[in-house]
Each structure stands twice: as structure tokens, then as C-alpha cells.
Amino acid sequence: MGRSITSVAQAITTVEIVIEKNREYCCNHHNDSIEKENRLENTNQEFYVRTAGTDELKQVGELLVNVYSGLDGFPKEAEQPQYYDMLRNVGDLVKTSNAEILVAVSAGGSIAGAVVYFNDMKNYGSGGSATQEKHTCGFRLLAVDPKRRGRGLGKLLSNACIKKGRKDPQIRQVIIHSTKAMKTAWGMYEKIGFERSQDLDFMQGELPVFGFRLKLE
């Protein structure tokens, strides 16, 4: 009788292990499917967009500093040290707000560009009136590795943010900002439908910053 009870217990344990493994497989398969679906939605022939991993945030910060410090007509770190500290520690935005950092990644896994997406403008962090906008999402700090420019990465990252906004039924518009030092990005924003909105303009120190809107309705 003792052996029979032991055998039954062992059989039950075996079944439980099999069920748990099947559950883990289904969960992992589901997550993999979501990741593949996101990649297909936000991809071009060379790169795809995904959320940055926590182990990649330092690299993203270094990319932002490298890109913005190299812009002609944009303030250098000595002029706006606090701004560059924010760029370097961009991962803190994920910890302190509802921001999401998206990265454009090559097939080989290298990060070629990044942007910070906000689904609530109260955490957007700009000057001016943008943080008071309701039913609005936005993105900031778009940056593309200088060695990878000309491959549509800025547009790929921008469209990924727009798609996230469209998926939220509460979001009615997207707000962004740019400067005259970012001529390429400025032109790209207008081509994908953004329009200038002077009510969103502000001064970042001595630097004029210009606002744009894209209506989603």
C-alpha cells in the first residue's frame, strides 16, 4: 500500500511539472509572438524598433550626448551642463516618469538610434505649455548614430511613436519640439504630417525651441 501511495504521489508530481513547463512554454511563445509583431510593425529593411533594455540605457545616453554635442548651432555641454547631464542619464526618465525609450536596432543587434516616448505630457519635461496638454503623447531626444544617417532611422523611430499614440484611444495628438540646428529632423517631421504650433514654442536658455503638433483624429 505504501509503495502504491508513493507511486501515485510521484505521478502527480510528474504531471504538475509537465503542466508548469507547458505553461512556461505558452507564456514565452506568447511574449515572443508579441515581440515579433512589434518588430514587423516598426521595421525597415535594415533596422527594427523595440524598447531599450535596462542594460542598454547607458549606451543610449552616450549616443544622445554624442549626437547633440555634434550639432552645428546647438549649445555645447559647457553652455548647458544640466541638459547634457539629462541626456547622459536618460535612463532616469524611465525610473521617474512613464517614459519609454525606443531604440532602432540592426539585424546584428547594434543600436543605431533612439527616442524617448511619453504617453502623458505632464512628464514630457520641456519648457512652455506642452506639459499642460491633455489627451496627448509626445516624443523627445530623437538621435541617430552619425554613421547610420541617411537610412530612414529618424522616420522609423518617429513613426513608431506615432503608432503607439494611435493605439491609445485616449490620445488625440502628438507633440514634439525641434530647433533650427536640427534641420534634417525638422523637414522629416513636416513630411510625416507635423505642423508648426507657435503656442508650444519656448526658450531653452538662449536657444529658441519650436513646437509641432500632429492631429490623430
Image (cartoon, helix red, strand yellow):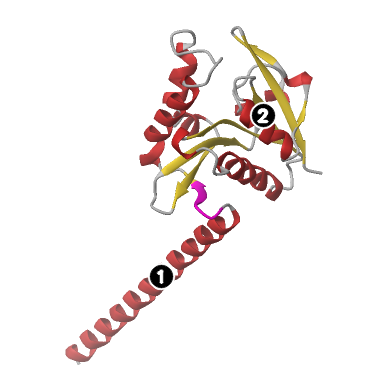
Say whether residue 102 is magenta.
no
Residue at 53% from the left image edge and 18% from the top image edge: 72
Specify whether 202 is left or right of 198.
Answer: left
x%, y% of residue 73? Answer: 56, 14
Element under label 2?
A: helix
Q: Which residue is mark 2?
A: 186
Q: Residue at x 39, y 45 (%)?
A: 110
The three-letter amino acid code for the residue at tag 1 is: Tyr
Q: Is residue 99 visible?
A: no
Report the residue that reaches farthest toward the left.
Answer: 3
Kindly tell me whether residue 32 is visible in this rendering: yes
Name the mark on residue 25: 1
The magenta segment is 44-50
The crowding category of the residue bearing disc 1, from other C-alpha atoms within 10 Å (few below 14, some 14 to 19, many at least 20), is: few
Where residue 51 sits: x, y (%)? 49, 45
Q: For residue 74, what is the image quadrant?
A: top right
Query: Is 202 situated above or below 217?
Result: above
Taking the spot 26% from the left edge, 82% from the top edge, the residue there is 9
